[in-house]
Image (cartoon, rainbow, N blue to C red):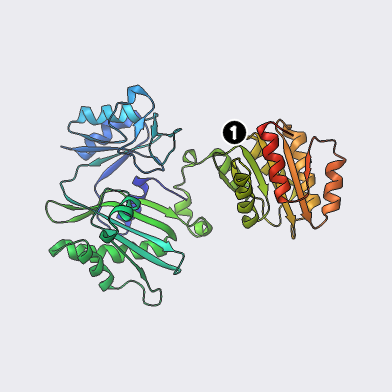
Amino acid sequence: MNIHEYQAKQILKEYGAPVSRGVPVLDAAEARRAVETLGGPVWVVKAQIHAGGRGKGKFKESDAGEKGGVRIAKSEDEAVAFVEQMLGKTLVTHQTGPSGKQVGRIYLEEGAAIARELYLSLLVDRETSRISFIASTEGGMDIEEVAAETPEKILTFSVDPATGIQPFHGRKVAFALGLEGQAMKQCVKLIDTLYRLFVEKDCSLVEINPLIVTESGDIKCLDCKMNFDSNALYRHPEIVELRDETEEDPKELEASKFDLNYIALDGEIGCMVNGAGLAMATMDIIKLYGSEPANFLDVGGGATKEKVTEAFKIITSDPQVKGILVNIFGGIMRCDVIAEGVIAAVKEVGLQVPLVVRLEGTNVELGKDIINKSGLDVIAADNLADAAQKIVKAVKGGA
């Protein structure tokens, strides 16, 4: 689960991390009051969307201006004007894709006198099963770009959970970032704070980019991205309250209500599969035979007829889908349950695109018999390769 920058900074503030004063704005009418609350003389106006690259992004609407999603205002009127220009407009960045994201929230923040920009993040290293730190002197840039061009400028290390965070970890980061004096002491404290936050809130990512050194020699978290482990949200109702459903794909949001593992993609063939591994293999073989998957969808091993019906409805709600491949290997999941779910869904929402069904495993003959007697225009397949070839051919204008 992702949250907005201003929400992440509120959590940082609660843990004692250094952040600038700021005020979220959800309505243009609030802009003047927010500007006056901060007092200036410099304001930073930041569009709040769940995507990076806001400063270099561009708005689709011409009346939103040409200065991107992060702007510096040097007067109250200018700050208010920027808020009014951005709020409700669609911002396109390298992470949003061409469709962009609508800006429903603005964060007004006091300006900062920046001497240096640094990079700092914490994430779960799945290779070591530990929390890892990444630090670099190249703040303000995408860390992937730094890794590709100047990997020697990146420090990476993991923390042994048996010992937890120690002062030497903070000093290690401070030395790597070239910090001295009070900034070094503040860095050591910040590293301890971030690790504690990461563990206590069940984070999967905390990225501060940039972490700045001000002209007065202090460090400050100027921007923050914070993600949480969705499997641990039951422990954090205060985090769940921060969820902004308008930032999520409507189909993914609907899928989550039925405990379906669904991720929207850019292709044209909708997939309904049981098991993550089989789902990935299905997507791979669709690409192998010349098309692209429109989604990842794992209905799980114990799906009910109702869940299968909802899964099918979610797939068909995607206007990009030109064909559907149902690929089920029945172990725990019975093929007859899948068949009943598919038939129920087709009767409810209709079938406007080719449908290929491949069933194998528990109650496979019963499942096939249910589909054959349904009267539906379904293309049967004997195996995965056969299924992929048939759906691609149907979509491309053959079968």
Q: In this view, does 280 lie to the left or right of 107?
A: right
Can residue 264 be spotted in the picture? yes
Count of marks placed on residues: 1
Quadrant assignment, res 293: top right
- Examine the rendering and report whether any part of residue 297 can be seen: no
Query: Vertically, is 354 above or below 216?
Result: above
Q: Which residue is outermost to the bottom?
A: 162
- The local secondary structure at tag 1 comes to loop
Residue type beneath disc 1: Gln
Categorize mark 1 by other alpha carbons within 10 Å: few (<14), some (14-19), many (20+): some
Quadrant of the image occupied by residue 276: bottom right
Query: Which quadrant of the figure contains the C terminus?
Result: top right
Q: Mark 1 points at which residue?
A: 320
Residue 65 screen position, x and y as percent: 30, 26
What x and y, as percent, mark residue 366? 86, 51
Q: Which of 27 and 272 is in front in this view?
A: 272
Residue sitting nearer the eye, 231 or 63: 63
Q: Where is residue 248 in the image (x, y as percent from the top left)?
A: 50, 41
At horizontal 44% and vertical 37% (from top left) the residue drawn is: 97
Q: Is residue 84 above or below residue 333?
A: above
